[in-house]
Image (cartoon, rainbow, N blue to C red):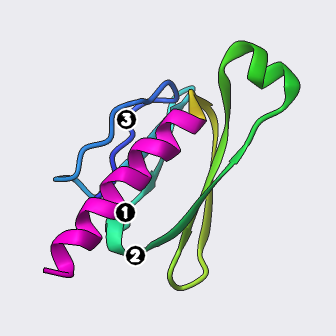
Amino acid sequence: MLLCRTAACGDIKSDVDDTNVRKGLSWKSLEMLLNKIEGIQVNQSIFGRLLGFGSITVTGTGGTKDPFHNIAAPFEFRKKAQEQIASVQNLENR
């Protein structure tokens, strides 16, 4: 399960299925089991690449696409999420 608590997120925890991104005084929340994630797309402008931020779009098995903007180190976020998805799949295949 996926957790992102702030716009500058980097921590992913497998025991929580809540993704929250804080933007000003509002929150966006996404709950999705790791085994229900089909893909994580990263979009990053040249400016974002220079400053280390970008947007991610989480695609679920039902075709849902949930974008999250202004994420710090979006490629690192995707890498950590993919590692955890792979570990969940390995546990399910045992």
Q: Which residue is mark 3?
A: 5
Compute the Cα span from label 3 to label 1: 12 Å
Is disc 2 surrounded by few (<14), some (14 to 19) or many (20+) residues within 10 Å? few
Please indicate, yes or no, whether residue 73 appears anywhere in the rendered image.
yes
Kindly report the distance in space between the C-alpha atoms of the residues bearing marks 2 and 1.
10 Å
Q: Amino acid at mark 3?
A: Arg
Q: Earlier in the sequence, mark 2 or mark 1?
A: 1
Q: Bounds of the magenta span?
A: 75-94
SS category of the residue bearing label 1: loop
Marker disc for residue 50: none
Nearer the N terminus, badge 3 or badge 1? 3
Position above or below: 6 against 47:
below
Residue that numbered label 2 is attached to: 36
Q: Is residue 77 left or right of residue 93?
A: right
Q: Position of residue 4 (x, y in %)?
A: 39, 40
Q: Amino acid at mark 1?
A: Glu
The quadrant where residue 52 appears: top right
Report the residue marked by disc 1. Answer: 31
Residue 11 lies within the magenta run:
no
